Image (cartoon, rainbow, N blue to C red):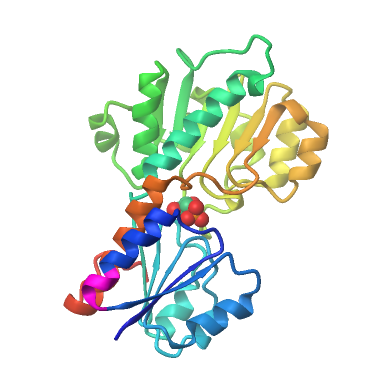
Amino acid sequence: MKKVLIATVKPFAAAAVNEIKKVLDNAGYEMVLLEKYEDNSQLLEAVSDVDAMIIRSDKVTKEVLDAANNLKIVVRAGAGYDNIDLDAATEKGVVAMNTPGQNSNAVAELALGMMVYMARGKFNGKAGSELKGKSLGIHAFGHVGRLVAGIAKGFGMNVLAFDPFLSSGVIEEAGVKAVDSAEELYTASQYISLHIPANERTKKSINFELLNKMPEGATLVNTARKEVVDEDGLMKMFAERTDFRYVSDIAPDNAEEIAAAYPDRHFFTPKKMGAQTAEANINAGIASADQIVNFFENGDTTYKVN
Ligand code: 3PG
């Protein structure tokens, strides 16, 4: 009987775990649940005899892979897989997958929710501003970026997008103005919503030079990864541009410094909340379980990322 570990420091909604169990039961697989673990040693122990593993932002390091004697596949229930050591997985012959698109709507709704929150002065009772008529630049037009564009158009925002991997035609087909460079996007956008992955090319790429191109009322919205923002540049932007605001679902390392110096110009969720809805958990959880069953039963590697 195949054993599938669900290892989640930040647990799925109970309904999602039930749905995952149904998929695994139907396949005749055993589900092992390790939620809210506090020490990596618990993960090392739990992974030792499982055939497959479902994770969220949980770190799958070389150490974890070395401790997993039977592991064939790890599925990141979500989009970003920067928490998996892909080289180590490949070396060990472990297939790594993600579940693209499954939690995107939840993330997109949070991005717009955080924009409204900042535009209304964090609901402080004073006159704020509206999103209608403001320009929004979407940095990377993947699953989340597209959904953000759709919702923002409903707010009456002027939406632009830049994606280095997509032709302008593909972006324009979605009814969004395409621009040719990140510089052009930031120059034209009062709001920027980040949807780039964290990798060697993108880390610290959102720097002062780029941010400072934004017009008056510059607000950076980050539901992607903290690593893509250059924190020195961020501090310089806060200091030099008194109009600049930063809202993020992933607090930067210097969050306390920002909170102390610029209390009204930032908001950071206490824990990454973007994909934290029952719907997103159910979608990504079921997709993960389905992908594992399909991999073992049919050799399907459609969402392999290594
Ligand atoms: C993702 O990459 O899918 C999101 O960042 C969600 O991460 P989470 O599963 O840890 O909430």
Q: Is residue 25 magenta?
A: yes
The quarter of the rendered structure image containing the N terminus is: bottom left
Q: Which residue lies furthest to the left in this view?
A: 298
Q: Is residue 52 magenta?
A: no
Residue 98 screen position, x and y as percent: 37, 62
Q: Is residue 294 left or right of residue 267?
A: left
Total tally of numbered discs in the picture:
0
* In the foreground, 158 or 25: 25
Q: Which of the 4 image quadrants contains residue 104?
A: top left
Residue 300 screen position, x and y as percent: 21, 72
Q: Residue at x 82, y 36 (%)?
A: 260
Q: In this view, does 298 lie to the left or right of 255?
A: left
> Does 226 sit above or below residue 138?
below
Region rendered in magenta: 24-28
Q: Which residue lies furthest to the top in this view?
A: 127
Q: Residue at x 70, y 27 (%)?
A: 265
The quarter of the rendered structure image containing the C terminus is: bottom left
> Does 148 sit above or below residue 142?
above
Q: In this view, does 282 lie to the left or right of 205?
A: left
> Does 301 sit above or below residue 124?
below
Residue 48 screen position, x and y as percent: 49, 87
Q: Is residue 249 visible?
A: yes
Residue 129 screen position, x and y as percent: 58, 13
> Is the stretch drawn in magenta largely helix, strand or loop?
helix
Q: Residue at x 64, y 33 (%)?
A: 246
Q: Can residue 179 be seen in this view?
A: no
Q: Which residue is drawn at 65% across and 9% down?
A: 127
* In the foreground, 139 or 20: 20
Q: Which residue lies furthest to the bottom in this view?
A: 69
